[in-house]
Amino acid sequence: MGVAALYELGRRYLRKVNPVAIASIVSILTILVPIQMVSQTWDDHDRSGRYTCRDFGQNYLMSLQDEGNPIVYTNGDNDTFPLWYNQDVEGVRTDARVCNLSYLQTDWYIDQMVRPAYDSPSLPITWPRIQYAGRANDYVQVDPELKSHLQDLYELYPHEAHELLGDNPFELKNILKLWVRNDVNEYQRSVLELLVGEGNSVHVIPTDTVFVTIDKDAVRRSGMLMQGDSIPDRMVISLKGRSALYKNDLMMLEMIANANWVRPIYVAMTVGEDNYMNLWQNFVQEGLVNRITPFTTTMTDDAGNKVPAPGAENFDTDKTLDMVLHRYKYGGLDKPGLYLDETVMRMCYTHRRIIAQLLTNLISKGRYDDAKKVLALSEKMIPTYNVPDCFDSGSLEITKAYAAVGDKKMTLEHLRNLWKRSTQYINYYYNQPSAWFYSSQREIILNFYCLEKCADIIGSTNPAWTKELGVMEFVRPLWQQSTGVVKQNMATGQIISKDKENYMHFLVLQHLNMIVETLDRAQSDKYMQELVGLMTQYTDMGGNLK
C-alpha cells in the first residue's frame, strides 16, 4: 500500500515523466527498506541450526521410565507443547501420557485423559463424569479440625466406625469416596453430618494428612530408586498449608491412589511448587522430572531449605547419568554464534543445572571418572560461548566439580567468567541512583553470594588466583566509595533522610569483607575493625541498620 501511494503521488506531481519510470524509481527506493531491516536484524531472528525446542521437549520424555506407560504432569507452555509436538509429529514416547495441570481443572480435558491416546492407556481416573463435569468438585475445603472428631469416633465406637467408614478413615481412597464425592448411603451421610456439625457441609476434607496403603510388591517391581531395604506400610501425603484442594489436585490424588506404583507418575521440574501440594516430600529426581514415590525423601531444615530426609536419597544419580550421557539431545548448542533468546536461554540454564546437580552428587559419592565424562560433555554440548557462565545456570557447581577432579585450568577459566559477570552486575547496580540501588538489593546480594563462593574455591584451590582475577582491585574502590558515602552522610547529618542508601552501603561493606576474609585474614581484620567502628558510630547517631 505504501509503494502504491508513493507511485500515485509521483504521477500527480510528475505528470510529464513516464509512469513506468516513476514505478521503477519508487520500487528501487522502497526495496532498500526491507534490505536495510534484514541487514541489521537478521542475526537476531536467525534460528537456523537451533533445535532446542524439539530436543529439550524430547529430553523431558526421555527422562521417563521406558516401562509402565508413565504419566508426566506439566503446567506451562514450554514444558507441554514441545512434548506434544514430539509425540504427535516425531512419534517419540507415544507410550507416555503428558498431563497438563492447568487444563486438568476442566471437564473436557479430563474426558481426554480417561481415554487412551496413541500407545498410552487411559489415566487411572475412576470417577463418574457427573463428579467432575461443569462446576462439580471445582474445589473442596480442607478442615484439619475435623480430624480429632473422626479419631474420637473410632476410639468411642470402633466397631461401628470401621463398618461405616472403613478401616482407616484417612486412607486417600476413603477420603475421595466418602468426603469428596459423597458416595455414601443415608446412614453414612447422617454420621458425616453429625461429625461436621449442624449447618456445615459434608463436602470437605477432614484432615491435613492422608495416607496411601502401599503394595510393597508393586513398589519392588516399579523400577524406582529404593530407599534402603525396607518399604513403609503407608505413604504420607501432607496437605498442610492448603485451605482447599481444587479439581486438578483431586485428579492428581485420584491417580496416585489408583496407579499402584507400577505406572510411574512424574512431575516436570519446571512445574511450580504451588501446583503439586506437598508432594515434593516424596520426590526422587530423575533427570528433568521428579518421580512421585511412596517414600518420604525430602524435608526442610531449620533454615527452611529442602534437604534429603535421614537415610534417604532424592536424586537418582545412575539414571540421570545415563540420561545426560546417552539419552539427551542438546539442540545444536555447540554451533558457534547460535542465536538464543531469553526464553530459550532459560531452558538451556535448566539443562545445565541438571548437569550441575549430577556433578554434585557424583563428587559426593567419589565417582570422579564419571564426573570427568559429564564435565567433558557439558563443555562440548552446552559451551560457554553460547550459554555464558552465571550463577543461575549452575556454573558455580560446575566450577567446584572441576576443582574437585583436579582440573585447575578449567577451574580458573570458569572462575574468571563468573567473577567477571558478577562484578560487572554489582558495579552496574552500584552506580545507579540510590532508589534503584536500594530496590536492586536482591540482585546485588545474589551476585555477592556468587563472588563469596568463588572466593571459597580460590582459597581452597590456588590463593594466587586472587591477584590474577583482580579481587582486591574490585574490593578496594567499592570499600572506599561506600565508607566515604556513609561518612559524608554522617558528617552532614543525613542519617534518617538517607537511611536506605546508608543501609545498602553497609550491606556492600559486609559482603566485601566476607570475600576478603576468605582470602586475606590480615586485611580482613583491618576491614572488619573499620566496619564495626563505622556501624557503631552510625547507630549512636540514630541510624537504623535493620
Image (cartoon, rainbow, N blue to C red):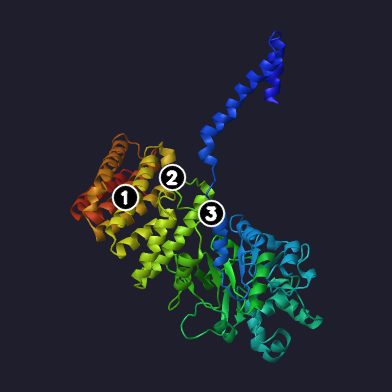
Total marks placed: 3
To which quarter of the image does residue 221 belong?
Answer: bottom right
Is residue 534 visible in this depiction of the protein?
yes
The amino acid type found where label 3 is placed reads: Thr
The image shows residue 388 at horizontal and vertical percentages of 41, 50
Distance Cα–Cα, label 1 vs label 2: 24 Å
Q: Position of residue 324 (x, y in %)?
A: 47, 65
Residue 440: numbered disc: 2
Q: Is residue 246 visible?
A: no
Picture coordinates of residue 464 (x, y %)? 21, 53
Callout 3: helix, strand or loop?
helix
How would you rate the neighbour count of disc 2 (Cα within 10 Å): few for under 14, some for 14-19, many for 20 or more?
Answer: some
Taking depth in this image into account, of 243 and 329 the one nearest to the observer is 329
Name the mark on residue 416: 1
Residue 431 locus on image (x, y percent): 37, 37
Instruction: Give how far apart the Cα atoms at labels 3 and 1 are.
Output: 27 Å
Instruction: Judge whether 374 appears above or below 346 on screen.
Output: below
Q: Earlier in the sequence, mark 1 or mark 2?
A: 1
Look at mark 3 in the image and give the residue it sits on.
52
